Amino acid sequence: MAVYIIFFGPPGSGKGTQASRVAADLAIPQISTGDLLRSHVSQGTALGKVAKPIMESGALVPDDLVTAMLRERLAQKDASGGALFDGYPRTVPQAAALDGILAERGGKVGAVLFIDVPDAPIVDRLVKRAALEGRADDTPETIRERLRVYREKTAPLADRYQAAGVLRTIDGFRSIDAVAADVRAAVEAARKGAR
Ligand code: AP5
């Protein structure tokens, strides 16, 4: 049975880092809405033109646009065995939309891996990344806004997934390998549950 796992947590918590390792292990695609949006921005598509200033401000791109993009990506062949969601859902309407999309495929969210990291190391990590990669939204000001938006719009989703019995909290303020070991164990448990 297809397995659907959400990597959840504040900006810079390591969602992408961990999801890409699991994707390589399981041959299930990592679907990062941030990466998909950045690719639209660099290609200058209509969606990219709308998304660019929003992303640079640290706000969220409108739910309907992001959900349509996600639905299209999930329809690709490589996602027939499941997907690892990195950066989606981020709002209550997105979580409801994802439940509907997965139900249409005969699936459901198998696990939500909440990678928990305090604010101070997040700012350090993202400022470091800005120096290396120059991501437009990794400025100290925008990082603060992304954290604020996360707390207001995204963090409340933890209650929804806790109530559904699928939330697994992982201490993300450790080495990448130590976090990966816990992520692997949680993914294995979710895959067993999906069989
Ligand atoms: P998005 O690209 O999703 O950014 P984000 O959530 O802010 O996440 P990041 O990519 O910054 O962090 P991450 O948790 O993946 O950590 P990573 O592994 O990269 O979204 C960008 C923007 O797009 C949003 O602000 C919004 O505008 C828009 N958007 C995207 N999705 C949307 C949606 N669903 N709805 C609406 N709008 C949406 O690691 C970060 C750094 O830390 C890296 O340098 C990494 O090497 C390092 N690191 C990772 N783990 C560790 C560790 N354990 N120890 C030390 N360093 C570590």
Image (cartoon, grey):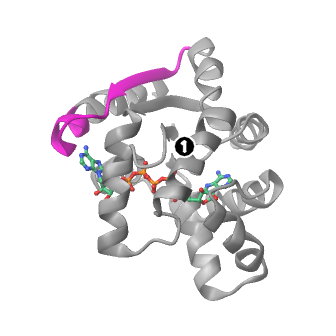
How many marks on residues? 1
Tell me the residue at 42%/53% (across/down). 28
Residue 35, position as x, y percentages in the image: 52, 66
Q: Residue 48 is drawn in which quadrant?
A: bottom right
Tell me the residue at 44%/31% (across/down). 113
Can residue 107 be spotted in the picture? no
Amino acid tagged 1: Leu
Magenta span includes 174: yes
Q: Does the Cβ of the disc 1 residue fall within 8 Å of ligand 1?
A: no
Q: Residue furthest front?
A: 141
Quadrant where the C terminus sits is: top left
Q: Residue furthest bottom?
A: 43
Residue 158, position as x, y percentages in the image: 58, 24
In magenta, the rendered stretch is 165-181
Q: Please name the residue that numbered disc 1 is placed on.
A: 147
**109 lies above or below 44:** above
Can residue 161 be spotted in the picture? yes
Is residue 3 toward the left or the right of residue 91 in the image? left
Mark 1 falls on what kind of element? helix
Residue 152, position as x, y percentages in the image: 67, 34
Is residue 110 toward the left or the right of residue 124 in the image? right
